[in-house]
Amino acid sequence: MRSMRLALAVFLIAALSAPLLAQHPTLIAEKVLTIGPGSSAGPYLFGRIAAVRTDTSGNIYVLGSFRAGIAKFNPRGEFISMIGRPLFDFSSQKEQMSYLNGHEDFARDKFLSSRTTGELYAPRDFYLDEKRILITDIRRLVLYDAQGSLQRVANLDRDSYEQAAFPNAQGELVFLGPDAGGSLFHVLDEKGQIVRSYGDKFAMPPEVAEKISGDLKEAETRMISRPVGYSFGPEGEALLLSPFSYEIRIYREERLWKTLTGKPPYSSGFAGFTYPNVDGKPAGLITNYIESPVLLARDGLILVFLAKSRSEASSGARQSFRVDVFKDYEFAASFELALDGYPSHLGPKGRLFTIGSSLNPFVNEYVLKGLPGN
């Protein structure tokens, strides 16, 4: 009888504790690979890392911004090949600016000639699937096949504010970037001309809009209205994170399919705005994120990383994040997580890739343990 009472007590304690334990989940990040200085697979020096992606075989692709091109590594972090050719090969932003300030005419002429040959100037991001690699460079999209052979160059208008690009289900090239008319996505024809646009820009709060005035109002409004995070799916799905509120928009077939709201919302440290003055004159609007939120999506999971401190962000050293997880388009849980570097890519089976700063340019691969559904 006594043993039965004891068993019943244990059962009741466990049953009552289960909801409490479920409210305090644990997410563990186990580092399994480093590419870059100090790597066990051998050193590989990046000038500055713009983005990281993986393919279905587990190969790792690292886009350099100054040493413009994509370095391809196998799953063990061993170098395989380079994709793309740099217009200039710089190891740092200081070296880039020093050279260009002294060779303006030559740099301009070389840049104009590259509009047909496809050399990369300052690539920002890239899209990767089994058929192609699409790089977003300044005022152009450069398309390669899966083997890294140049296919075409789509030159864009200088006021396009392109952030990223992806192919839609019809194989057309689409780039993300707010225009003067208020659209976010723009579909290009074979000549690189915009044939249609879609996706309404994010509504700017009145307290922000009233601070913008003068000759640069239109340009500043478009820049500030850019999504602070985005992710693209294999069939042209697009997820955008609003710069003004904790809102995630999901587009399918050029239509707004669903809107998600984060829980809890951004703290005041992530969504404030200031308008600093220099010598008594307005000097531009600044978005006061500690660091820009990062949105990553894969296999039914959406992860939003919110940096909790700016203290170590500039060095690429370990820093703390709040990670909000959405599973099957519903908010699932929030976690606290410390990572070396900044989140850049979510691979299959909870593989997370982070990148270091230009002072400490590395790629880390983590395995995330404890994600809902994994």
Image: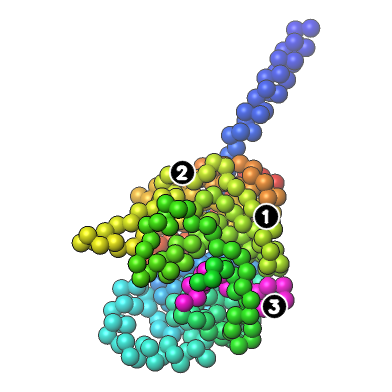
Which residue was labeled with disc 1?
258
Residue for point 59% across, 76% down: 134
Disc 1, disc 2: CB below 8 Å? no
Q: Earlier in the sequence, mark 1 or mark 2?
A: 1
Q: Residues within 10 Å of mark 1 (few under 14, many from 20)?
A: few
Determine which of the numbered discs, if any, sits on residue 267 in the image: 2
* Left or right: 128, with 181 as reference point: right
Residue for point 60% across, 47% down: 261
Find numbered disc 3 in the image and state the secondary structure of the residue it sits on: loop
Instruction: Give amino acid for label 1.
Output: Lys
Task: List x then y, in percent, for residue 179.
Answer: 52, 71
Closest to the camera, between mark 1 and mark 3, is 1
Q: Earlier in the sequence, mark 2 or mark 3?
A: 3
Instruction: Give amino acid for label 3.
Output: Gly
Res. 36 image quadrant: bottom left
Q: Which residues are magenta?
A: 159-179
Which residue was labeled with disc 3?
171
